[in-house]
Amino acid sequence: MTDLLAIAYPWVKSLHIISVISWMAALFYLPRLLVHHTEQVGQSGQTHDLFKMMEFKLATVIMRPAMIGTWIFGLALVFTPGIVDWAAVWPWTKGASVLAMTGFHGWLVGRVKAFAAGENRLSGKRYRIMNEVPTLLMIIIVFSVVVKF
């Protein structure tokens, strides 16, 4: 199995990068949709229904498959011999950040469900602040992988 992972490494790495880009795009965009939904649309009406549909589709059609792909291809890379030096700090900081990113993903899905149920209680300002979470985690992940500290 490890020989197969080594042979497939460039393909798996490419698919991992594609998945990460798709996941990050959704993680950046969904909080912005929630800001506008909160500040401009409200919790009823035709535009509310349009935003609910857009948020739901972004979360389920793009964000969820991208996260799953990121995890599958990332784990395949982790199990590829010679790729990860577990004695270094970087795999642990990256792993913790990916877990935090996954938690943020789950928090966003919860917010989409709250909007769908008409139960949003957060302000646009709160969504703006939360929109910075994936950026900070991305910075930690990229430096972890590239610098390998």
Image (cartoon, helix red, strand yellow):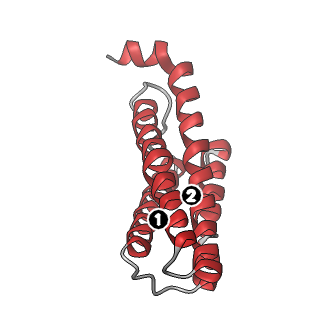
Residue 10 x, y percent position in the rendering: 57, 20
Tell me the element at label 2: helix
Q: Nearest the camera: 146 or 27?
A: 27
Q: Nearest the camera: 40 or 66?
A: 40
Residue at 51% in and 56% down: 93
Above-or-below relation of 80 to 128: above
Whether the residues at callouts 1 and 2 have beta carbons within 8 Å, the answer is yes
The number of numbered discs placed on residues in the rendered structure image is 2
Q: Please state which amino acid type lies under the numbered disc 1.
A: Phe
Q: Residues within 10 Å of mark 1 (few under 14, many from 20)?
A: some
Q: Quickly name the residue at label 2.
A: 27
Determine which of the numbered discs, if any, sits on residue 29 in the image: none
Q: Which image quadrant for residue 34?
A: bottom right
Above-or-below relation of 17 to 47: above
Q: Quickly name the residue at label 1.
A: 104
Above-or-below relation of 134 to 127: above
Residue 69 x, y percent position in the rendering: 44, 37
**Distance between the Cα atoms at labels 1 and 2?**
8 Å
Q: Please state which amino acid type lies under the numbered disc 2.
A: Leu
Mark 1 or mark 2: whose residue is earlier in sequence? 2
Can I make out residue 92 in this image?
no
Can I make out residue 141 in this image?
yes
Q: Which quadrant does the N terminus fall into? A: top left
Q: Nearest the camera: 87 or 118?
A: 118
